[in-house]
Amino acid sequence: MVRIISKEEIAPHVFSMVVQAPLIAKKARPGQFLILMVHEKGERIPLTIADYDREKGTIRMVFEVVGKTTAMLSKVKEGEELFSLVGPLGIPSEIANYGTVVVVGGGIGVAPVYPIARELKAAGNRVIGIIGARTKGLLIMEDEMRKVTDRLLVTTDDGSYGRRGFVTGPLAELLRSGEPVKKIWAIGPAVMMKAVCEVTKPYGVETITSLNATMLDGTGMCGTCRVSVAGQTKFACVDGPEFNGHLVDWVEFINRLSRYREQERLAYELYKSSGG
């Protein structure tokens, strides 16, 4: 059992949850993820690590309510317990002193970008951050990102805050300006990561993306998280979740994300109609 230390709604339907998990916190590194179960008969879902505190033995997760299990998770109260939490899973981000780097976070993707930016800054890099959301009210973790970046650019689709448009706009301008960017991380919706890679590919700047594939066991056994990278089959859970986005088959990946959309919709509707 994993005890919940704190839970906060940081944007509409977006929650930050801190849990007591000292063994995981001791080993967690940027780019890795967890798999949790809310209760004994619940499904297993992956969530990327948004932060960790080795001294306190805590892990922070940020999630959006998009279906039955995340809705159930949002209703668990402080002091209560989750049935299980497994991690850290996946290969950590490659942190080194590259020079000037850019981290791009879209929507919930800002959460997993944050520890990456923090560790890149600690490694001596000049870190430029670009974060975006559909509207001002959905923008998360801006204050945290400002503390770990040398420069932070903010966009909203509707122009309600920061620059109007998508994260690809300021990124393209940075690259056109001749900014000596050595490496880029981009995390967010699949279509956003694909768009970022289309912007960066002509400049030859390695662009690391985190693939939020459908997962079950998280250990490479079930194969449901398979992705095509450079023409080879990889498993996001054990070979990733980070891959060079220029080598990812984005059409296949996006299509695979929608495989169980109808079943997920039905499960959520039944959950809501039953009063949760």
Image: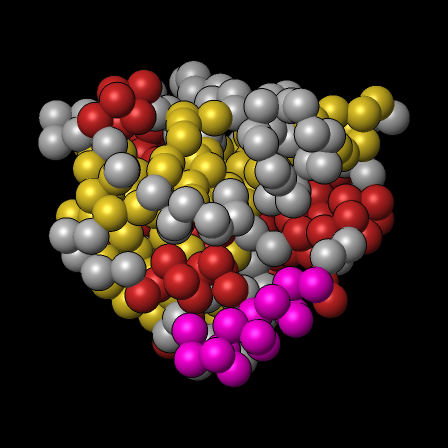
Horizontal side of residue 229 vs 38, given as left or right: right
For the residue pair 50 and 148, the one nearer the viewer reads as: 50
Q: In which quadrant of the rendered view does residue 58 lie? A: top left
Q: Residue at x 40, y 62 (%)?
A: 72
Q: Nearer the viewer, residue 58 or 30?
A: 58
In this view, 48 is above or below 261: above
Q: Furthest-right residue in view?
A: 231
Q: Is residue 71 visible?
A: yes
Image quadrant in which the N terminus is located: top left
Q: Which residues are magenta?
A: 263-276
- Magenta stretch: helix, strand or loop mostly: helix
Residue plotted at (58% across, 23% down): 219
Instruction: Answer above or below: position of 132 versus 128.
Output: below
Number of numbered discs overlaid on the protein picture: 0
Q: Is residue 15 magenta?
A: no
Q: Nearer the viewer, residue 106 or 239?
A: 239
Q: Is residue 112 visible?
A: no
**Quarter location, residue 83:** top left
Give coordinates of residue 63: x percent, y percent: 41, 56
Residue at 38%, 50% (x, y): give it: 38
User: Please, which colouring scheme is shown?
Assistant: secondary structure
The C terminus - image quarter: bottom left
Q: Position of residue 229 (x, y in %)?
A: 78, 28
Where does the image place residue 82, in percent across and percent down from the top left? 31, 46
* 94 shown above or below 195: above
Q: Does residue 38 appear to the left or right of 274 in the view shown?
A: left
Measuring 57% from the left and 75% from the top, which residue is drawn there? Answer: 270
Q: Position of residue 74 (x, y in %)?
A: 35, 63
